[in-house]
């Protein structure tokens, strides 16, 4: 990877609040099916924990509250305490992934951390204490926005060093062997291709060592819920044996998490979170098999990130902007259980009568925060820092959309749709002063739509998509990542959509990493359409009513 200046890449964001982990092991029936487990055997070797900050030989856990943006570390010795990696990340947009980095810089007994920012920058943070990282950086390098998932599985190459795996949007998986030192090129050796076809999985989970041979393994889940075990070989060029199916039904969970060794038997274990926020643990019994699940804790609907989670992180938009008929605006934040938080006032009463020229966007400031954009003559203004563009085109567009980074150059972009169905891309600029987006470039013609929604990634490939309604029918326009043709031709989702007054993009409402859609009836009933991520299957699942009384004149 190469060094780079700050780039912003956004997709979708789930928002949450607080977390309470229980440690009781209450027996519960296993919902996902699994292959028959062999009798438990003693592990003959054990891999080092990937994130042992208190030095007791067991991995510690880190999670982020979306209500505050604060990270908390659960030390196996002393329990929960605040954890710092620079500033708090309230919008969850700065660090897409937090990865354990077991002594990749220096073997001082305090593990480092890697953070992958939404601009495609990978950063190495030095550890200074069990609950704090050095705010100064050891190293940073750019260009990682070409990958939609990066994981730290443990030691894949059997040299005692932490390695990385990274998957491109097209499904090619690469291994980055750890070097055990850091120079200007970073802590990892050049990438080695593992192979293609990995886009079939919506979750890739670094598990450390599942079978007691001291070599890292991984598990991978399909959107249909099949979970597979990939046994590590110790080779950098062919790091995995052929996959073995663990079982089905794992789409019961919105996140599968590599938790390292939870019971002290030397094998890595799994945590899995339900859509209602309950965590279950699956203890490894060897050979890529697991025992029946047991209750681990609750409150997961209030978390925006958990160290070791397997899903593609959803960062960027995580709320809905609403304006009533009196011109008073509110925002509704999402949680990870398919529901909205309470309405929060935005501005004063009656201040937002220009609702028809407003949209809720993201990806256009240094922190990648959600923002309200207003078209004026001439230009586009943001509520978080002034002028986005001085182009008069924005005043003439029928719709202005802020979808995030559609071209995958690390910059947030803006789209404009004119009255004749021409779609213009205003690419994000590397410099935020004085303009944040460039001149419009026509990227599509003849786009017929009475509503066009920048949904984020509803198809599960990591690229922002569009959804449009033309009369009674709804269509998806898949993101391509191309600057000249950022969206594919529309594909039919279904009919019956004229029953709704509003369509809007809340981001990821249920914590699975895919953006969802809401539809609101003229009477104010709100329905959530969950994105399935199923290749060749329906884009959205059957609707679920999530709120009422939303008789707003504007939603975005």
Image: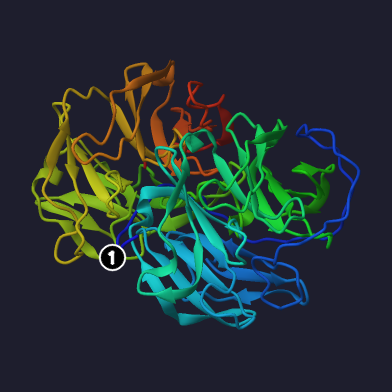
Quarter of the view holding residue 302: bottom right
Along the viewing direction, whichever of 407 and 180 lies nearer the viewer: 180
SS type, badge 1: loop
Q: Quadrant of the N terminus?
A: bottom left
Disc tally is: 1
Note whether 198 is above or below 329 in the view shown.
above
Q: Position of residue 483 (x, y in %)?
A: 21, 41
Note whether 551 is above or below 26 in the view shown.
above
Q: Is residue 232 visible?
A: yes
Give the residue number, with chain letter if any, for mark 1.
4
Residue located at (60% from left, 44% from top):
240
Q: Position of residue 390 (x, y in %)?
A: 10, 55
Q: Is residue 109 left or right of residue 480?
A: right
Q: Position of residue 249 (x, y in %)?
A: 70, 31
Along the viewing direction, whichever of 146 and 27 lies nearer the viewer: 146
Q: Position of residue 265 (x, y in %)?
A: 84, 59
Mark 1 crowd level (few <14, some 14–19, many ≥20, 10 Å Cα): some
Q: Is residue 195 left or right of residue 205?
A: left
Quarter of the view holding residue 185: bottom left
Residue located at (55% from left, 27% from top):
543
Q: Is residue 348 visible?
A: no
Question: How are the colours assigned in the image?
Answer: rainbow
Q: Quadrant of the C terminus?
A: top left
């Amino acid at each position: 990877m190469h060094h780079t200046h700050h780039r912003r890449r956004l997709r979708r964001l789930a928002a949450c609040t607080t977390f309470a982990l229980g440690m009781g092991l209450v027996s519960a029936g296993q919902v996902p099916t699994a292959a028959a487990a062999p009798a438990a055997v003693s592990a003959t070797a054990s891999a080092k924990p990937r994130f042992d900050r208190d030095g007791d030989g067991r991995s510690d856990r880190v999670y982020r509250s979306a209500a505050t943006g604060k990270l908390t570390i659960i030390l196996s010795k002393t329990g929960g305490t605040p954890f710092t990696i620079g500033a708090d990340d309230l919008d969850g947009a700065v660090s897409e992934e937090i990865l354990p980095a077991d002594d990749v810089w220096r073997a001082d007994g305090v593990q480092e951390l890697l953070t992958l920012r939404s601009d495609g920058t990978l950063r190495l943070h030095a550890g200074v204490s069990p609950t704090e990282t050095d705010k100064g950086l050891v190293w940073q390098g750019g260009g990682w926005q070409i990958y939609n998932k990066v994981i730290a599985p443990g030691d894949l190459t059997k040299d005692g060093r932490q390695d990385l795996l990274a998957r491109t949007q097209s499904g090619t998986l690469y291994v980055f062997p750890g070097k055990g030192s850091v120079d200007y090129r970073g802590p990892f050796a050049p990438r080695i291709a593992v192979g293609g076809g990995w886009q079939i999985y919506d979750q890739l989970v670094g598990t450390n060592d599942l079978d007691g041979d001291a070599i890292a393994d991984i598990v991978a889940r399909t959107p249909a819920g099949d979970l597979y075990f990939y046994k590590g070989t110790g080779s950098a060029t062919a790091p995995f044996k052929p996959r073995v199916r663990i079982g089905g039904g794992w789409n019961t969970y919105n996140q599968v998490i590599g938790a390292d060794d939870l019971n002290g038997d030397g094998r890595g274990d799994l945590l899995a979170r339900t859509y209602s926020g309950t965590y279950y643990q699956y203890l490894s019994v060897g050979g890529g098999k697991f025992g029946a699940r047991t209750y681990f804790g609750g409150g997961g609907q209030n978390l925006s990130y958990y160290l070791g989670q397997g899903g593609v992180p959803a960062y960027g938009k995580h709320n809905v902007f609403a304006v009533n008929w009196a011109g008073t605006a509110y925002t509704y934040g999402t949680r990870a259980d398919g529901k909205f938080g309470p309405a929060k006032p935005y501005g004063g009463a009656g201040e937002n009568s220009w609702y028809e020229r407003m949209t809720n966007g993201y990806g256009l400031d240094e922190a990648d925060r959600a923002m309200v954009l207003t078209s004026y003559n001439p230009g586009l203004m943001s509520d978080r820092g002034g002028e986005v563009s001085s182009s008069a085109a924005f005043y003439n567009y029928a719709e202005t959309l802020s979808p995030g980074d559609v071209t995958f150059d690390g910059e947030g972009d803006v789209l404009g749709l004119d009255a004749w169905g021409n779609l213009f891309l205003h690419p994000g600029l590397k410099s935020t002063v004085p303009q944040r987006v460039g001149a419009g470039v026509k990227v599509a013609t003849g786009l017929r739509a009475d509503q066009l929604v920048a949904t984020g990634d509803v198809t599960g490939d990591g690229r922002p998509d569009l959804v449009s309604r033309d009369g009674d029918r709804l269509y998806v326009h898949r993101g391509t990542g191309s600057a000249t043709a950022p969206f594919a031709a529309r594909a039919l989702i279904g009919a019956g959509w004229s029953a709704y007054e509003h369509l809007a993009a809340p981001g990821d409402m249920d914590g699975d990493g895919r953006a969802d859609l809401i539809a609101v009836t003229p009477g104010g009933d709100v329905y959530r359409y969950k994105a399935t991520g199923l290749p060749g299957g329906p884009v959205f699942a059957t609707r679920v009513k999530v709120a009422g009384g939303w008789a707003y004149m504007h939603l975005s």
